[in-house]
Amino acid sequence: MESNQVDRDTAVAQLASLQADRAALADRAMQPWWYDALLGGCVFLLLGAQAFDHPVATVAGVLLGAGGLGWLVSTYRRLTGTSVSGFRRGPTRKAIAVWLVLYVLVVVPAFVLHLGYDQHWAMAVAGAVLGLSIALISRWWSRIYVAELRGEL
């Protein structure tokens, strides 16, 4: 009987420790507001750079956007001590699903206008719409993730 109580006490203590760790991670997991703004800027650069008529400007915009995304990932890892896939399973999936549907609905017509009708401005508009969208969806995704860590979902 005594051994059973020790095991139960140990399990309760370990569970409390795990819950404290999740709460601490939740406190660190929400990125600062500027992260979302820069994420939106990087997406704008990646897509909007297609609007340039000059290949060097297009490549420069894409490289700058991709480099910015890499910097954001490393900064998030440094600030939080963790890295979380946006495509992970769980309640955050609905935010990613909204993003992917919106991305297709905006990019496909923009590419048709850009490539089929020589309307280069369409990619800049798509970049602006999707840059703003990813900034908002990133914040929404993070709030869902933090609520999940806190056991609120």
Image (tube, helix red, strand yellow):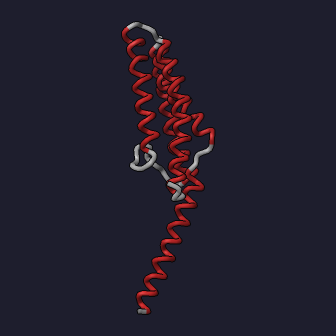
Q: Nearer the viewer, residue 1 or 47?
A: 1
In the picture, measured across the screen, residue 80 lies left or right of residue 54, that is right
Give me the residue at 52% from left, 24% from top.
Answer: 129
- In the image, is residue 6 above or below residue 31? below
Quarter of the figure with the N terminus: bottom left
Give me the residue at 56% from left, 61% from top.
Answer: 23
Residue 81 percent coordinates (x, y): 53, 55
Q: Nearer the viewer, residue 84 or 20?
A: 20
Q: Nearer the viewer, residue 42 or 15?
A: 15
Give me the residue at 38% from left, 14% from top.
Answer: 112
In the picture, measured across the screen, residue 81 lies left or right of residue 115, that is right
Count of labels in the image: 0
Q: Residue furthest top?
A: 117
- In the image, is residue 123 above or below residue 22? above
In the picture, measured across the screen, residue 93 lies left or right of residue 71, that is left
Residue 96 percent coordinates (x, y): 44, 39
Give me the residue at 51% from left, 43% from top.
Answer: 141
- In the image, is residue 112 above or below residue 80? above
Residue 62 percent coordinates (x, y): 47, 25
- In the image, is residue 18 above or below residue 81? below
Q: Residue furthest front?
A: 153
Residue 40 percent coordinates (x, y): 55, 31
Q: Residue furthest right?
A: 33
